[in-house]
Image (spheres, rainbow, N blue to C red):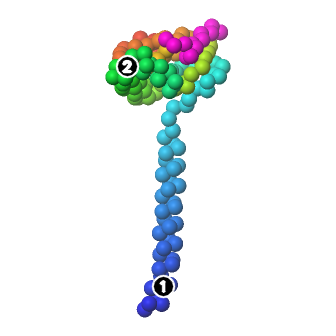
Amino acid sequence: MKTMRKHLLLPVALLTLAACHESKVTEEHTATAAAPPSDIPADAEKISQPCAILYAPDSARLEKLKKENGEEAFYTMADDNQNYLADARMFLEGKGVKIMAPNGGKLHFESKSGHTTTIDLSDPKYNWEAWLYDGNKVNKIDLTNIENEYLKYMKK
C-alpha cells in the first residue's frame, strides 16, 4: 500500500503544478487583453483621427504644484481632478471614443483640410486637462461637464 502511495504522489504533484501553471498563463493573457488606452509618445508627430485627450501632469509637475499650493490644497485638487478624469474616461469609453493619455511633449492635430494645431504640454498652464478632437478642430473641455461637452463637440 505504501509503495502505491509513493507512485501516485508524484503524478498527482506534477498534475497540480501543471494545473497551476496553466491558470497563470490564462490570467496573464486576460490582463493583456484589457490593456489601458494607448499612450501618445512624447515626440508624437500628428493626430488626425477623432479622439479624446486626457492629460494628467507628470511627477515633476505634481511636486511643483504641491509646493505652490501647499500639501492639503494640493491633495484635494489632485483627488478632485483624478476623479473628473476617471469619470470622463468612463463616459467616453461608453460612447466608443478613442482615448489617448499623453505623457507630455507636443501634440500635433492635423485636420482633414490640412490645418494644424499644436499643444505643448510642457507649458505650465496645463495640469489636468482634456480635449475633444472631432477630426477638424481641437476643443478644450470642462471635465466637470463631460456629457454636455461631448454633445457640443462630438455629436454634430
- Work out which residue is located at the far bottom of the displayed protein and give it: 1
Q: Is residue 69 visible?
A: yes
| Residue nearest the viewer, comparing 107 with 156 | 107
Height in image: 22 above or below 29?
below
Label 2 sits on a secondary structure element that is loop
Q: Quadrant of the C terminus?
A: top left
The alpha-carbon separation of the residues under discs 1 and 2 comes to 67 Å
Q: Where residue 70 is drawn, which disc sits there?
A: 2
User: What secondary structure predominates along the stretch shown in magenta?
Assistant: loop
Please rate how many residues cluster around mark 1, counting C-alpha atoms within 10 Å: few if below 14, some from 14 to 19, many from 20: few
In the rendered picture of this protein, how many numbered marks are placed on residues?
2
| Residue nearest the viewer, comparing 49 with 81 | 81
Height in image: 120 above or below 82?
above
Relative side of 114 to 102, left or right: right
Range of magenta residues = 113-125
Query: Residue 73 location, x and y as percent?
Result: 34, 19
Query: Residue 102 location, x and y as percent?
Result: 55, 24
Name the residue beneath numbered marker 1. Answer: 6
Q: Which amino acid does label 1 sit on?
A: Lys
Height in image: 35 above or below 73?
below
| Residue nearest the viewer, comparing 17 with 74 | 74
The residue lying at 47 percent from left, 75 percent from top is: 12
Q: Residue 23 lies in magenta, yes or no?
A: no
The residue lying at 51 percent from left, 77 percent from top is: 11
The residue lying at 49 percent from left, 11 percent from top is: 125
| Residue nearest the viewer, comparing 4 with 59 | 59
Query: Residue 71 location, x and y as percent?
Result: 37, 23
The residue lying at 45 percent from left, 85 percent from top is: 5
Q: Where residue 39 is drawn, which disc sits there?
A: none
Label 1 sits on a secondary structure element that is helix
